Image (cartoon, rainbow, N blue to C red):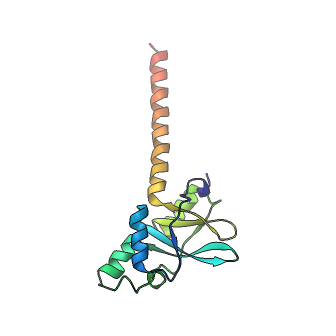
Amino acid sequence: MPVGEICNRDVIILQRDNTILEAAKLMRQHHVGDVVVVEERGGVRVPVGIVTDRDLVVEIMATELDQTVITVGDIMVQELATAKDSTGVFETIQYMRSKAVRRLPIVDENGALVGILALDDLLELLSEELLAIAKLVRHQREKETNRRQ
């Protein structure tokens, strides 16, 4: 299954020059743990960075920096890991593990942002699949038991 089918298409985005305070307010308003920083390139929004709630706490709050002057461009992760929407789920999981990221912007063939995939999304998907397998095993056991009675 390609990750484009399971990623969250409702991505909270900002530009590099938006403040950290704006990012924090958006995260709170939308109940998310990150914002994706984008640039317009040829009419498409291309992800260039990401800022997480942890970044805000560790980089800004803990160091008592001014949230109204620091921009998301100042603290965003510069080497952004992304995955194409056609990439398979398990390949994406391996990639996220190798890059040690919990959130991964998903892009189309042109590099345009189409969604975001979080570790939580993957855990939900995998737990549903495991539950389906467990039900299958239980059903087969019950079927065999009923046949032998």
Compared to 86, does 64 lie above or below?
below
Please give the name of the residue rendered at 39% of the width and 76% of the height, measured from the top-left corner: 55
Compared to 42, does 113 lie above or below?
above
The part of the image, by quadrant, that contains residue 33 is bottom left
Residue 105 position, x and y percent, is 55, 67
Compared to 29, does 73 lie above or below?
below
Please give the name of the residue rendered at 61% of the width and 74% of the height, measured from the top-left corner: 46
Please give the name of the residue rendered at 50% of the width and 69% of the height, measured from the top-left corner: 98
Mark yes or no: residue 112 visible. Answer: yes
The part of the image, by quadrant, that contains residue 26 is bottom left
- Is residue 59 or residue 142 the one in the foreground? 59
The part of the image, by quadrant, that contains residue 131 is top left
- Count of marks placed on residues: 0
- Is residue 97 or residue 7 the one in the foreground? 7
Residue 2 position, x and y percent, is 62, 55
Please give the name of the residue rendered at 43% of the width and 75% of the height, measured from the top-left corner: 22
- Is residue 52 or residue 119 the one in the foreground? 52
Mark yes or no: residue 32 visible. Answer: no
- Is residue 66 or residue 4 the one in the foreground? 66
Q: Quadrant of the C terminus?
A: top left
Residue 10 position, x and y percent, is 53, 60
